[in-house]
Image (spheres, rainbow, N blue to C red):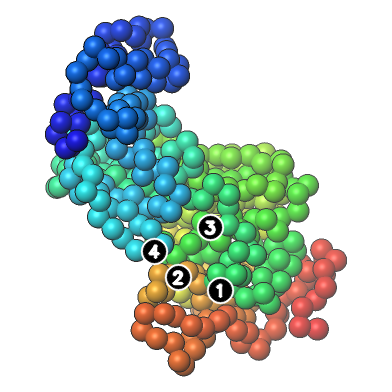
């Protein structure tokens, strides 16, 4: 059956369902699906559909009425890691690191806009012409970004970043070649020893995945508070877990709850550690102050092209919220962050830990770094296949005081 005929049939069945079902009584999904099946299989209706076409119609009508329409089967495909909707006709997906264009398209811009409103309403967000950009999430934790016209010139833009149902473990990252066994052993001790760790990298480099994996080393009896713009962290091994999420302003421009507000509130919740999903702006000063006021073991991520570049970006973010001398900011950073990890997405689409450095202090206007590991590419690597590994620089950990306090063995000794 061609797409136009299928769309006409879907529209017809939807109209009959709305006539037959009392939606004022909030029918269940099973009741809606049952009504659709009865209509489609009604022998009195001359549809000339085969059995497979009937089931396809039932699924399309149900997804249209109760799910996310043509996006639903894409979301149910576990091999899809990213969905990119550029207006009604251009839909792309990422599978195994490669982007593919789909033949599927929305029947109208209104339908796409309805789906967008359904997504944002479920997480108490709003998006419209007056406020055309919003971050949201789906029930399964997938990250959603939306940009509407007039900002988006080719129609509503919807980007969905999907995460695996079961978070990737550090053991799996070792198998994938993203990190070495030796470096993992170090990081496990550093997390247990409550070193403050900052993870940086570009978009799609695996920062959130790595933070999830790293969180598995947190002792199970600690109280953890996570703070995010849009909740997507999947921390599974901690029982005493508090998850906080920002809130956008209402239609009157009031009621905003920012990451800065959440960080300040979290300090009164008796946290053992604070995990900030991503630092983007002036909240950097609050994160540094939290790390510097007894909340050791805190974790966070940010966008940066290298460890050194990330430190400069944190300076800029602090300056956007507080007019402090550069020297004072750098001293705060050097005192707060113990370890900084840089991730990258390589030319073969794999994700690697590229550098692990220790922040060892501040001297003569500069934050001092002690590189511990760096990624070394193999000489025989091809242009489309990356070979290499994370190797030690030979430098030992200089600040081992936290390991001593935690009763953990001193590495390199």
Q: Which residue is mark 3?
A: 209
Answer above or below: position of 283 versus 391: above
Q: Name the image quarter holding the N terminus.
A: top left
| Mark 3 neighbour class, 10 Å CA radius: few under 14, some 14 to 19, many 20 or more | many
Q: Which residue is mark 2?
A: 350
Q: Residue at x 77, y 78 (%)?
A: 411
The x, y position of residue 379, in whole percent, is 46, 93
| Between 204 and 34, the one nearer to me in the picture | 34
Q: Residue at x 47, y 55 (%)?
A: 279
Quarter of the image for residue 299 reads bottom right
The x, y position of residue 386, in whole percent, is 44, 80
Q: Residue at x 16, y 26 (%)?
A: 8
- Nearer the N terminus, badge 3 or badge 4? 4
| Mark 1 neighbour class, 10 Å CA radius: few under 14, some 14 to 19, many 20 or more | some
Q: Is residue 238 left or right of residue 109?
A: right
The kind of secondary structure element at disc 3 is helix
C-beta proximity under 8 Å, tags 3 and 2: no
Q: CA distance from mark 1 to mark 3?
A: 14 Å
- Nearer the N terminus, badge 4 or badge 1? 4
C-beta proximity under 8 Å, tags 4 and 2: yes
The x, y position of residue 190, in whole percent, is 70, 67
C-beta proximity under 8 Å, tags 1 and 2: yes
- Nearer the N terminus, badge 1 or badge 3? 1
- Nearer the N terminus, badge 4 or badge 2? 4
The kind of secondary structure element at disc 4 is loop
Say which of marks 3 and 4 sits in front.
4
Q: Which residue is mark 1?
A: 177
Q: Name the image quarter holding the C terminus.
A: bottom right
Q: CA distance from mark 4 to mark 2?
A: 8 Å
């Amino acid at each position: 059956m061609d797409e136009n005929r299928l769309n006409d049939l879907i529209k017809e069945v939807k109209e009959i369902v709305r006539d037959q079902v009392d939606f004022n009584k909030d029918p269940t999904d099973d009741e809606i699906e049952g009504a659709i099946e009865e209509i489609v299989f009604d022998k009195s209706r001359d549809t000339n559909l085969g059995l497979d076409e009937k089931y396809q119609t039932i699924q399309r009508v149900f997804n249209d009425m109760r799910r996310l329409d043509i996006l639903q089967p894409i979301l149910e495909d576990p091999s899809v890691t990213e969905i990119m909707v550029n207006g009604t006709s251009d839909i792309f997906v990422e599978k195994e690191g490669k982007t593919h264009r789909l033949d599927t398209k929305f029947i109208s811009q209104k339908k796409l806009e309805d789906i967008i409103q359904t997504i944002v309403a479920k997480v108490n967000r709003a998006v419209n012409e007056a406020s055309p950009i919003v971050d949201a999430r789906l029930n399964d934790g997938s990250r959603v970004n939306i940009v509407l016209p007039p900002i988006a010139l080719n129609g509503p833009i919807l980007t969905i970043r999907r995460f695996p149902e079961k978070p990737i473990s550090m053991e799996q990252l070792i198998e994938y070649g993203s990190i070495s066994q030796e470096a993992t052993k170090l990081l496990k001790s550093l997390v247990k020893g409550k070193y403050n760790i900052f993870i940086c990298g570009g978009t799609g480099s695996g920062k959130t995945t790595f933070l999830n994996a790293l969180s598995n080393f947190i002792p199970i009896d600690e109280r953890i508070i996570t703070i995010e713009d849009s909740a997507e962290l999947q921390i599974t091994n901690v029982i005493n877990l508090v998850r906080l999420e920002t809130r956008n302003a209402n239609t009157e421009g009031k009621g905003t709850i920012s990451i800065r507000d959440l960080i300040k509130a979290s300090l009164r919740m008796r946290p053992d550690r604070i995990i900030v999903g991503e630092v983007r702006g002036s909240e950097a000063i609050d994160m540094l102050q939290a790390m510097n006021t007894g909340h050791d073991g805190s974790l966070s991520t940010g966008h940066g092209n290298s460890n050194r570049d990330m430190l400069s970006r944190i300076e800029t973010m602090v300056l956007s919220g507080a007019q402090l001398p550069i020297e004072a900011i750098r001293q705060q950073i050097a005192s707060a962050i113990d370890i900084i990890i840089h991730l990258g997405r390589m030319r073969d689409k794999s994700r690697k830990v590229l550098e692990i450095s220790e922040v060892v202090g501040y001297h003569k206007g500069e934050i001092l770094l002690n590189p511990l590991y760096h990624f070394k590419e193999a000489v025989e690597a091809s242009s489309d296949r990356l070979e290499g590994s994370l190797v030690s620089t030979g430098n030992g950990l200089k600040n081992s005081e936290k390991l001593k306090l935690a009763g953990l063995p001193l590495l390199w000794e």
